[in-house]
């Protein structure tokens, strides 16, 4: 890995961490709801059951009282080159991990476009998604479960994709266990309707 590759990798990972922080902060603190069907837009279902949402909000406030995004980003900038190499966080491996998350994010976005909305996750996409090329194809963007009821599945897939990439980052940087646990709590709290 050259110095330039290392710098590019750190910049792209940094942009992803900023996005991940904002994504978790928004979903944990504010939550959001989605329409049960595309046709019935007046009936919105919370993504997370209200008492679980209150617990997530409290957990995020507690987390932020002891941790800052700037500290996490600082640790990333101090990560030795060998750690980035060991965790596949540069070059084609980094491209593949970011692309995977982008494809999953675009699947969520494809569902939200059906109700003329932008998913909260998509609103937060920053520089990390720009260099992902080629852009996801229509087949990659298509939800794996038909209909708008696939929203929770699409978000669960996105959380799984985030897990794969974020776990590499957290292990390489040597911090982030508490953030990882907040992310896992959010993923486990998703309230999927019974079909």
Image (cartoon, rainbow, N blue to C red):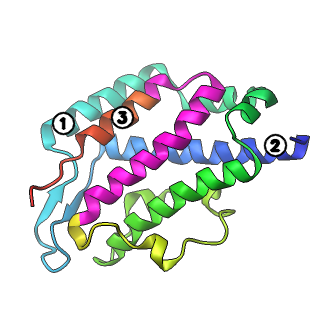
- Per the model, the C-alpha gap separating discs 3 and 2 is 29 Å
How crowded pointer 2 is (Cα within 10 Å; few <14, some 14-19, many 20+) is rated as: some
Earlier in the chain: of badge 3 and badge 2, it is: 2
| Viewer-side residue, 65 vs 98 | 98
Relative horizontal placement of residue 155, taking residue 195 as reference (left or right) = right
Point out residue 171 in the picture as x, y percentages from the top left corner.
Answer: 59, 27
The residue segment tinted magenta is 150-179
Point out residue 176 in the picture as x, y percentages from the top left corner.
Answer: 52, 26
* Callouts 3 and 1 close, C-beta under 8 Å: no
- Per the model, the C-alpha gap separating discs 3 and 1 is 13 Å
Q: Which residue is mark 2?
A: 7
How crowded pointer 3 is (Cα within 10 Å; few <14, some 14-19, many 20+) is rated as: some
Which label number is shown at residue 184? Answer: 3
- Per the model, the C-alpha gap separating discs 2 and 1 is 39 Å
**Residue shown at 35%/69% (left/top)?**
143
User: Secondary structure under badge 1?
Assistant: helix
Query: Would you identify the image quadrant in which residue 89 lies?
Result: top right
Query: Would you identify the image quadrant in which residue 29 lies?
Result: top left
Relative horizontal placement of residue 25, taking residue 35 as reference (left or right) = right
Which label number is shown at residue 52? Answer: 1
| Viewer-side residue, 133 vs 178 | 133
């Amino acid at each position: 890995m050259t110095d330039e590759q290392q710098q590019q990798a750190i910049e792209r990972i940094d942009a992803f961490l900023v996005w991940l922080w904002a994504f978790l902060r928004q979903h944990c603190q504010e939550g959001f709801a989605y329409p049960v069907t595309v046709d019935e837009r007046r009936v919105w279902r919370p993504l997370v059951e209200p008492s679980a949402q209150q617990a997530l909000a409290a957990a995020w406030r507690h987390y932020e009282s002891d941790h800052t995004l700037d500290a996490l980003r600082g640790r990333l900038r101090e990560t030795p080159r060998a750690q980035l190499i060991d965790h596949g966080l540069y070059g084609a491996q980094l491209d593949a991990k970011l692309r995977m998350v982008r494809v999953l994010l675009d699947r969520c976005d494809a569902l939200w476009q059906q109700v003329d909305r932008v998913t909260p996750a998509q609103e937060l996409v920053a520089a990390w998604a720009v260099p992902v090329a080629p852009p996801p194809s229509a087949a990659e963007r298509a939800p794996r479960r038909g209909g708008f009821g696939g929203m929770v599945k699409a978000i669960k897939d996105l959380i799984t994709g985030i897990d794969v990439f974020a776990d590499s980052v957290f292990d390489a940087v040597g911090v982030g266990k508490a953030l990882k646990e907040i992310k896992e709590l959010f993923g486990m709290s998703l309230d999927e309707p019974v079909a």
